[in-house]
Image: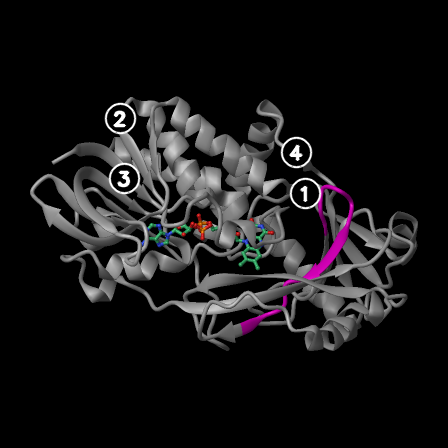
Amino acid sequence: MEQVDFTIIGAGVVGLAIAAEVAQTNNTTVIVEQHPHFGEEISSRNSEVIHAGIYYPTQSLKAQLCVRGKSLLYDYCQRYQIPFQQCGKLILACQPEEEQQLQCIYIQATANGVNDLQWLDQSAVATLEPAVSCSVALLSPSSGIVDSHQLMLRLLTEAEQQQAISLFGTRVNGVEQVADGFIVHVATGQAAAGQEDYSFKTRWLVNAAGLGAQRVAKAITTLVPENIPPLHYCKGHYFSLKGKAPFKHLIYPTPETNTTGLGIHATLDLSGRVRFGPDVEYVGDVDYGVPETRAKLFYEAIKRYYPAINQQDLMPAYAGIRPKLQGPGEPANDFIIQTEADHQLPGLVNLFGIESPGLTAALAIAEKVAEWVKQ
Ligand SMILES: Cc1cc2nc3c(=O)[nH]c(=O)nc-3n(C[C@H](O)[C@H](O)[C@H](O)COP(=O)(O)OP(=O)(O)OC[C@H]3O[C@@H](n4cnc5c(N)ncnc54)[C@H](O)[C@@H]3O)c2cc1C
């Protein structure tokens, strides 16, 4: 049976970042991805925002890995000419109670090490963003946007240059723990077209399967169910804005309290177009449709801070699914990165609930996984 050192399940931004990092250590590394190409799930259905690390609870993995990941990501983009723009972001207060909430956000950001936020009064906002309506705002100069596809392509190239092997169109169906690692059972191709099954042995196994992480974890024979958190699909729809962009910064409302998302905000892509979203809808299945009827909800939310919005200018764009660990109305969970200390299976790392800011945090997650591996 073939034997490798590292196996990473999932070629999204997180799996690819881990592969690029661990492949540097001269170990044989394999990336297993069920789709024919990288980044076909969460990593290509997001806002492509480089988050500053503002909102997450102090000392949470989300806060630490976002702040560290942001700095690693800007350096990485510069080093490898990956398109990005540090355009900055405004968080707006439109009501007196939102101004109080903005104060709390400022305090939380400072506790997270985000020390560059600036207060802007109404006239300062009007100078920066004349189309925006608010009473006061916070400017986050370190927020930005990145071309996530180019980022993933570069990470894959880097891993492959270090001799990592990518197995696309290959699905992990089962994992058995053995004395010094795991036997991974995979299937390639469609059952109807002569599906091929085979197995190989790996010393280390990283489960970075995104929406499939819980399913992969359940297929690991000796992993006890108590170590597998529940998964809730939480869909976010996007609408793009017809015509010329009315903003130069990312524009965010104050998030609703106990929010599951950050409120329907405006992000820019690297060609300067504006899209609004994502909203929040818990769903039972993976379905990427964007019903045109949601335009009304978007319009109502957007007009609070962009009064000139015309509902006819909102075009259904795309949707993504967050791998949430909490159900509707439950308090927000942190990322879960499980190692042997948590599940007692030497060599196994499970990543659960890698929702936003997972794109920003990907390089920091990879750094952390590589540190554990070296121990
Ligand atoms: C609507 C939305 C907006 C977001 N906006 C932002 C943002 O602006 N900024 C930010 O920092 N983060 C954002 N995020 C979060 C970010 O996109 C994710 O955290 C990140 O992309 C997760 O990457 P991943 O590699 O863990 O998952 P994925 O990209 O989903 O990769 C997992 C891979 O595993 C593969 N897989 C699954 N099961 C198997 C199996 N059995 N065998 C083989 N392969 C398998 C899948 O096919 C998939 O390719 C957003 C997320 C959503 C949903």
Magenta-span inclusion, residue 272: yes
Give the percent coordinates (x, y) of residue 226: 23, 66
Residue on which disc 1 sits: 144
Answer few, some or many: residues within 10 Å of disc 3's Cα (few below 14, many 20 plus, some between 14 and 19).
many
Image: 58 above or below 80:
below
Residue 231 screen position, x and y as percent: 38, 67
Q: Amino acid at mark 4?
A: Pro
Label 4: how many Cα within 10 Å (few below 14, some 14–19, many 20+): some
- Amino acid bearing label 3: Thr
Q: Amino acid at mark 2?
A: Asn
Q: Which stretch did the figure color magenta?
A: 268-281
**The CB of the residue at mark 4 lies under 8 Å from ligand 1:** no
Residue underneath mark 2: 27
Q: Is residue 96 above or below residue 165?
A: below
Look at mark 3 in the image and give the residue it sits on: 7
Looking at marks 3 and 1 on the same chain, the residue that comes earlier in the sequence is marked by: 3
